[in-house]
Image (cartoon, rainbow, N blue to C red):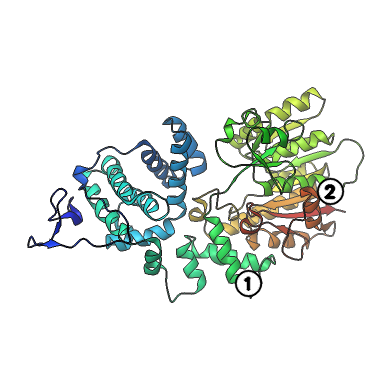
Amino acid sequence: MSESGGDRGRGQGGPRRNAQGRQRPERAHGGRERSAQKPSERGRTSDPQRLAAYTVMRAVADGAYANLELPRVLREKDIRGRDAAFTTELVYGAVRMHGLYDPIISVAAARPITKIDENVVDTLRLGAHQLLGMRVPTHAAVDETVALARKVNGAGAAGFVNAVMRRISERDLDEWLAEVVPADGDLTAQLSVEHSHPEWVVKALRAALLGHGAATAETIDDELSALVTSDNEPAKVSLVARPGLSSVDELVDDGAEASWLSPVGAVLPGGDPGAIRAVREGRAAVQDEGSQLLALALAAVPVDGDGTEQWLDLCAGPGGKAGLLAALAFGAGADLTANEVSEHRTELVRQTLRPALLQAGAHGRTIEVRTGDGRAYGEDEPERYQRVLVDAPCTGLGALRRRPEARWRRTPADLADLGKLQRELLASAIDATAPGGVVAYATCSPHLAETQFVVRDVTRKRDDIELLDARDYLRDASGEPVDVPGDGPTVQLWPHIHGTDGMFLALLRKK
């Protein structure tokens, strides 16, 4: 496609003309402002924010995680404040929504998305999100995307990007939805495109809503639509004040708002959490409120046993729940062992626990960070621990708001390997728990194959376990009458109901 694209026959600032040189009327585009410049007339350098966004997009395509790569790139390019917020929305939106943007790009380009170079596709995804998902003026979205293409994809690609962006800009989002969402498909297929979820994920979420009692046959369509919509909304920045190290009042004094859901939680309306002193010092941290409640519920269950309680976080990396458990253990006069199978993640746990380690050492308490296979604890240390947390590796389908690439990385085939690991970890945790002790099995996924089915399969083979009603302990931990759909005894939290990640919790008592 030539560099001039759809601007053939138009002089600089002049009217549109057809192939015979006759003037053509300007077409209306719903009030959207069109760029009058050719690619060659536009700026040849992209602004730092869009270049940073593209850099992160390519890293994600190579396997990086956006929530880890983006802060590094922002620091490296010294992008802060509103510019950092713009870059974040650009990256997260383009990665999260490319299940919708790709068919739109394909129509606008008049070719399958697989016939376009991957790096050019990423540029177009960033441009499409500016046009259809952000309040960026049309001329700026087109001009800056073409400038970015010129810098990172080359002059020839810039002409192609210009033509595609102009065609995308000719319709608003509703018009594009009418074009690309299958009108004759079932609701699952429609939601998959409109809300940019792989179809297998939508089906799994539908089954989970029904299986956990959060929807009925009459309400499932509305609940499923609300859930996938919430997956595309930016998650709030939730903070935890680790007891004994910080307080909610301290976070509030620094600009946060007290959480209604967690007694140790706060929500930051805006800004950088790193600007809060307690967060910088590791006395507080960014942590989802649902995740906080799971740790608080485990700590609230009465247990049998004499002497100093021993607590175990079997899968502690990267350390969020371990940080709260360490503070709670210190307050209860207990010792904590935090285990992680990966040496790299073990070091992350150690860094997260550093303030708690100093506090515990000064008061004669023990916090130990280990690298090891959680599946071996039941055999190596049988019946040692009074409280054990199994925050099992999972598909992460409950945290799609925070991990924009997660929905595209997982496949149904992952469930088999994860399910085997989850069952082995839970069985090991039960064996490592002393009689009268309690195990908390948790995932950040509502998928039935990772939650209820795991607990059912493990417990039905044993006669030394009873399921506690986790709903009671979660409400006690919250201090609020939290709406927990379903009949129990397990708990499933939901983004569209509770505003948290989709956390699952089962509490199992060792007889």
Q: Position of residue 34 (x, y in %)?
A: 27, 53
Residue extending farthest right: 306
Q: Which quadrant is the C terminus positioned in?
A: bottom right
The residue lying toward the viewer, choosing from 343 and 477, is: 477
How many C-alpha atoms fall within 10 Å of the one at disc 2: few (<14), some, or many (≥20)? Answer: many
- The residue that disc 1 covers is 219
Spatial CA span between label 1 and label 2: 34 Å
- The residue that disc 2 covers is 301
**Residue 6 found in image quarter:** bottom left
Can see residue 508? yes
Q: Position of residue 93 (x, y in %)?
A: 45, 50
Q: Amino acid at mark 2?
A: Val
Q: Please, what secondary structure does the residue beneath circle 2 have?
A: loop
Above or below residue 318? Residue 414 is below
Residue extending farthest left: 20
Write the residue at 78% across / 38% down: 328
**Residue 387 found in image quarter:** top right
The residue lying toward the viewer, choosing from 472 and 177, is: 177
Residue extending farthest top: 362
Q: Which quadrant is the N terminus positioned in?
A: bottom left
Q: Amino acid at mark 1?
A: Thr
Write the residue at 38% across / 50% down: 130
Above or below residue 343? Residue 141 is below
Q: Position of residue 476 (x, y in %)?
A: 81, 50
